[in-house]
Every structure is written in structure tokens, then in C-alpha cells.
Amino acid sequence: MTAGDTHTVQVALPYHLRTLARVEGDVAIEIAGPVTVRSVLDALEARYPMLMGTIRDHVTQQRRPFLRFFACGEDLTHDPPDAPLPEAVAQGKEPLMVVGAIAGG
Amino acid sequence: MSKVRVLVGTRKGAFILTSDGKRDKWEVSGPFFAGWEIYHMKGSPVDPDHIYASQTSGWFGQLVQRSTDGGKTWHQPGVPDGDAKPVWPPVISNKFVYDASAETGKPLTTHQWYDGTQHPWEFKRVWHVKPSLTDVNTVYAGVEDAAIFRSMDGGESWQELPGLRGHGTGPKWQPGAGGMCLHTILLDPTNPQRMYIAISAAGAFRTDDGGQTWKPINKGLHSPYIPDPAAEVGHCVHHIALHPARPHVLFMQKHWDVMRSNDAGDNWTEVSGNLPTDFGFVIDVHAHEPETIYVVPIKSDGEHFPLDGKLAVYRSRTGGNEWEALTKGLPQKDCYVNVLRDAMAVDTLDKCGIYFGTTGGQVYASPDGGDTWQAIVHDLPAVLSVEVQTLA
């Protein structure tokens, strides 16, 4: 994977964000360059600007506390945002999952 | 024939209830924004089909939605609808950033925390939206942590009016049990430079220069739960109301105590009178009788439900002190709901209608100024706010 590559990444959003973005199922996002949590979210927000501020805080750009990032059976939530995502995600074989924490009983 | 549209914000979405002027048969539409908390919806006095809604979530943060067709459809201001192509520069909608710049007053970054230490100001949600009386694209937002924002482009971009936090008492403000929220915004229809706001738990404030500078207006409030019961700030004001024909007369439901000011908040006197308990959240004024006011007494700050399980609205026709219980049509046994601070409103029909919603999901309406009541819906999610529009 090099900086010049373009990838189509699948992103699985929680129900309320799919409703907000008016999409069904996973969304396909084009990424130019390294596939990281940050680059995927940047591209996702550019494609669906109604999602700005809903996954990352508008000001701090920090992940909202009740959201998690999973992929390939791993919890990537606490990885650095510029760490490369698994190759299966970069190749579009596995989705990056944005998951709402189960809370409230 | 006139129509009435009731905007109901709940813990799990928004609902719109409509009726003709008789107000005996109602249609319910919604939920809109199902699953999200809708703290408040309010229509523009300039064009009632323009409605703003505060949509919020502990998971996904804060959005403001707008409808231009009376609530049938909604959109995020500034954001293309649907599967649009990316735009550059990126759209920035619903972004609330505290103004700490030196150019706009004293930068203020901390307030008092529960343990007495200073705590950073953190944006959490919009509690209250207040459209301008004269411009359909201007709207104010009261937020948590407490501050007031204004949008002049229909809700797309928001700027803080920083003079409120910058006037000096901010470090003494502290959150109430529901958070440190700015929950009430009142606009003076006779003076566009004058606004009132209220914060839990800081108190009431007024501006006379369009929001540039503010001053606390809490003289006469007595709150034994704070170290100095008569302090300049620190009072847990739950709601304030005024009549548009007499905007210098204010009525307040404080944590405990129902209060009245005849001088735009400069001085307050207690008018709890013969209320069975003067704890509560809502207060409102009859549309045609500026001395007729309504509250819903709640047992105590530790027991947020009506006395003895009997739900009652209390009405004073004398601007306070002398109160009568209004119970016809309201449950008189086994009722243990609460009525939250933004969950009462009035219409402006000849026989003034009174409306309130409960944490049990009922919205009650009285088409006769409170004499009789009926539940126009029974089983909504917990009601956070009720607003009413009287339509020609």
C-alpha cells in the first residue's frame, strides 16, 4: 500500500448514522493514499457531511466516547488514528465497523 | 378556521400533534428523528412553517434540524440532502465552538464543578432554540455547558454571544442535577435589544444591548441550598415566562419558589402563596390575560412527581399568591410522572389553550384555559418539551 494508491473501503455505520446519512447497508468510500481510521473518517465526512461531528467531536476531532472502531475481529479503537488499517479493510474485503457502545441496559 | 400544531420533543424522537380550533380531535405524526433525544422544537414567529429542532444523542452528539414545511420534512442546514457528491470546502453544520478570543471579551474557560474545583467548559447539547421575532433565518440556541449561541443563516453556522460568559460570574456557575444548561431564552417583543436567559444553576440574566453585555438579575431570590442564599449567582432557576404585551413582568419557577418581577428582573418577590408545594419546573402565562399564570407543583427536589399521586395544574388569576387547583380530566390517583421545564405552552385562540407533556409520555391539553383537560396522546416516550403554534 503506497501513498498514491486508491482504495475502496467498506464502512459499516450504526443504525442512527445510516438513517442520518440516508443510506442502507455498508457505504463504500474512496480513499486516496494510506487507509487509516483518520483517512477513512475524513473521506466519509466529505461524502456524507451530515455525519460531521457525530463520530468525532467537531472541535477536538476526538472519537466520541461511546463509539468504537472494529475490523477483522479486532478492536482498533485505541490504535493511533494514523495507523494503517488491516489489509483486508484496505482491499475492501472487510468493513471498518463504527460501533455504538451497548449502554442503557 | 384556525388550526393548532403542537411540537413535542421526547427522549426518543419528535412528534407533531395537529387539530382544528376546537381542539378535540388530534392527529399524531412522527416519530421524527426516531431514537434521538429531541430537547426542543420551536417554530419561527415570522413563518410558522419554519421550525428548528435540537436533535441530540449521548453517542453521536448534537445536530440542529430545520423544516420549512411545517415539520413534514427536515434537513440539516447547509448539508446537501441524500447521497450528494463531496463538496469543497467541507460543509460545517451544527458546529458549536465557545468563543474564548480576546477580541470578544474576557476569555473564559472554566466554571465551578460539583466538587468546587474549576472545570473546563465542554459543549454537550442544545437545550432550547429560540427563533427571532423578526427574521426567519436568525435563531438563538441555549446550550450545555451554559452559553448562548446565535445563527443568522438558518442554523448552518453558529456564533456564541460571549458577553454572557465573559461578564465575570462564570467561574461561580455550577451544574444542577441535569447539567449546567442554558434552558430558557425570552425575547422582548417591544425592545429588540433586550433578552432574558436562565441557567441551572446560575440564575437569570438580561441583556439590554442585543446580547453584547449581560448582567445577573437574581436580586430577591433566596436559595438555602447554596452557601449564600441571596448570592448574585448560583440559583437553580427552572424556567421563566412573560406575556408579550407586558414583557417587563417576569414569572419564574425556581427549584423551590414561584417568583415574580415587575421590573424586568431587577427585583423578585415570592408569589408561591397557597401552593401545596412550590417546587416544580414549568411556568407559563395565559395568552390573553397577563395576570393569569400556570404551574405544575411537584412534590420535592427528591421526589419528582405530583403530591399524593394526583396530577394538578395550578392557576393564579392574580399574578401569583392566590392559586386554584385544576384537576378535571387529569389523573387523580397513582400518577407519578414529572413535567419538565420546557414542557408547557399556550396557544393564542380566543379561548386560550394550555398544553403540557409528562415524563410518562402523555400530552394533556385544555381548550378552556385550564378548566378541563384531556390527554391528546397517552403513550409517547418521556416528553422533554412542548411548544404550540396557532395557525391561521
Image (cartoon, helix red, strand yellow):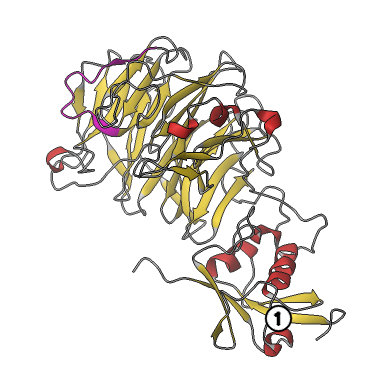
Query: Is residue B344 visible in this depiction of the protein?
Result: yes
Q: Which residue is mark 1?
A: A84
Residue B362's place in the image compared with B372, above or below, is below
The quarter of the picture where residue B236 lies is top left
**Among all residues in the image, which is located at the extreme right?**
A4
Residue A58's place in the image compared with B236, above or below, is below
Residue A43: % across, % down? 74, 68
Amino acid type at circle 1 is Pro
On whether residue B163 falls in the magenta region, the answer is: no
- Residue in front for this viewpoint, A52 or B326: A52
Q: Which residues are magenta?
A: B267-280
Q: Is residue B13 left or right of residue B156?
A: left
Please report, as a chain letter, where disc 1 is located.
A
Residue B120's place in the image compared with B82, above or below, is above
- Residue in front for this viewpoint, A4 or B51: A4
Query: Is residue B392 visible in this depiction of the protein?
Result: no
The quarter of the picture where residue A68 lies is bottom right
- Residue in front for this viewpoint, B207 or B134: B207
Element type at mark 1: loop
On whether residue B274 falls in the magenta region, the answer is: yes
Residue at 15 percent across and 28 percent down: it is B276
Mark 1 is surrounded, within 10 Å at the Cα level, by few (under 14), some (14 to 19) or many (20 or more) other residues, namely some
Residue A26: % across, % down? 64, 78
